[in-house]
Image (tube, rainbow, N blue to C red):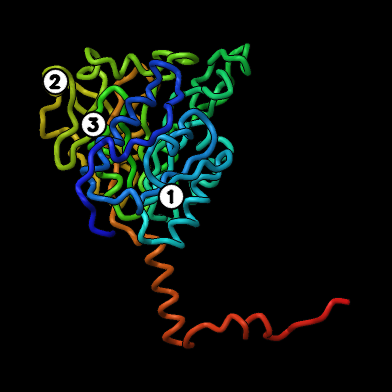
């Protein structure tokens, strides 16, 4: 990465009018990002935001960087091509739960399993906002919307579980009501080498207002958000009186007084076996249950671009530089009249 001059939030803010509904959680995420970028020490000229379709996908317009507003669901695939062709760039991918997990679900899981060097932000508001309130892949069973007037029958995706199942090397969760936490998690995701995905609980105050209020309201956080801190016992509550244990591989919430601190699970985000992180991702049954937040895993694994470079170097050492003209004219060839 090129050396960067000192920048401020203003330098990273474009001249475009921000066109989200007043009160949308996207404003908070955008501000957190614009405040974070000067701290990362990167250059605007080396930074690219790629998005798909949806409210979240307007993000590139508002960052004073390079950006691409792509087609529905294809942002991870397009960003993969960019990251492979230009290793010197910081490539961010931004999309909503509908964009990323419906038509884009296939592209997302393959970018994660390949460990392409991307920083992916998934804004989850459990609804389609841009198209005016249809249910999404993360909407709860029974959700009544314009497209499910009798209530949704679909079992929703848990984005963290999906990412861990796809063998992502960095997986985290934050929310739009805590700017400091967002900046911390976004910064860690950016500094991870490989595919990093951050789920952001984001409020759509028009079509799904208060979806995460039971978790993210300031007076509810101590009771409902379970901070994941590497090397520390997993505990929470106003007096840290509750904790998490692993019982035959299943994460359970207990009273610390009942089991003792030594019985609590000690979080290890670097564990290469993702089964414990997956168990933590299944701890909350719904958005009204205590929910882990923070970094689930941060695993050191071969980054895809580095692997490709090594293969090319090995091929050139064995066979010499490639000859495209010779390849195009190699046998068997034939003429079509």
State how far apart marks 2 and 1 are (Cα): 36 Å
Work out whether mark 3 precedes mark 1 in sequence or the reverse, and give the earlier one. Answer: 1
* Neighbours of disc 3 within 10 Å: few (<14), some (14-19), many (20+): some
Q: Nearer the viewer, mark 2 or mark 1?
A: 1
Camera-near label (2 vs 3) is 3
Outermost residue to the front:
15
Quarter occupied by the N terminus: bottom left
Q: Is 175 located above or below residue 133 in the figure? A: below
The alpha-carbon separation of the residues under discs 3 and 1 comes to 23 Å
Q: Which residue matches tag 1?
A: 112
> What's the residue at 46%, 62% (across, down)?
85
| Residue 72 figure quarter | top right
Mark seen at residue 181: 3
Task: Give how far apart the Cα atoms at labels 2 and 3 are.
Answer: 22 Å
Look at the picture and state if 214 lies above or below 154: above
- Residue 298 x %, y %: 28, 48
Task: Give the quadrant of the C terminus.
Answer: bottom right
Q: Where residue 29 appears, x then y in whole percent?
A: 34, 30
Closer to the N terminus: mark 2 or mark 1? 1
Label 1 sits on a secondary structure element that is helix
Q: Residues within 10 Å of mark 2 (few under 14, many from 20)?
A: some
Along the viewing direction, whichever of 313 and 284 lies nearer the viewer: 313
Residue 4: x and y, percent? 23, 53
Q: Pointer 1: residues within 10 angstroms few (<14), some, or many (20+)? A: many
Give the residue at x 29% y 40%: 11
SS at mark 2?
loop
Query: Can residue 176 be seen?
Result: yes
Give residue 52's position: percent from left, percent from top.
52, 39
Which numbered tag is attached to residue 56? none
């Amino acid at each position: 990465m090129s050396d960067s001059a000192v920048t401020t939030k203003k330098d990273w803010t474009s001249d475009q009018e921000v066109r989200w509904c007043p009160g949308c959680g996207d404003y908070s995420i955008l501000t957190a990002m614009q405040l974070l970028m000067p701290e990362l020490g990167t250059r605007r000229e080396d930074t690219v935001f790629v998005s798909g379709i949806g409210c979240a996908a307007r993000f590139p317009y508002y960052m004073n960087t390079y950006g691409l507003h792509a087609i529905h669901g294809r942002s991870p695939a397009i960003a993969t091509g960019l990251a492979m062709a230009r290793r010197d760039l910081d490539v961010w991918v931004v999309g909503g739960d509908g964009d990323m997990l419906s038509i884009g679900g296939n592209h997302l899981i393959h970018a994660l399993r390949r460990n392409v060097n991307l920083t992916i932000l998934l804004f989850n508001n459990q609804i389609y906002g841009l198209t005016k309130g249809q249910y999404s892949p993360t909407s709860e069973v029974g959700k009544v919307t314009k497209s499910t007037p009798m209530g949704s029958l679909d079992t929703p995706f848990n984005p963290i579980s999906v990412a861990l199942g796809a063998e992502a090397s960095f997986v985290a969760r934050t929310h739009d009501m805590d700017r400091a936490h967002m900046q911390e998690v976004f910064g860690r995701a950016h500094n991870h080498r490989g595919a990093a995905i951050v789920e952001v609980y984001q409020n759509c105050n028009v079509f799904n207002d208060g979806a995460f209020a039971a978790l993210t309201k300031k007076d509810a956080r101590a009771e409902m958000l379970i901070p994941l801190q590497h090397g520390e016992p997993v505990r929470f509550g106003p007096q840290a009186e509750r904790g998490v244990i692993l019982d035959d591989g299943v994460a359970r919430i207990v009273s610390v007084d009942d089991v003792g601190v030594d019985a609590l699970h000690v979080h290890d985000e670097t564990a290469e076996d993702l089964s414990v992180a997956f168990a933590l991702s299944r701890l909350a049954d719904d958005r009204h249950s205590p929910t882990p937040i923070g970094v689930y895993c941060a695993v050191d694994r071969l980054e895809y671009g580095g692997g490709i470079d090594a293969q090319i170097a090995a091929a050139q050492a064995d066979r010499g530089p490639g000859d495209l003209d010779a390849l195009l004219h190699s046998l068997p060839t034939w003429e079509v009249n």
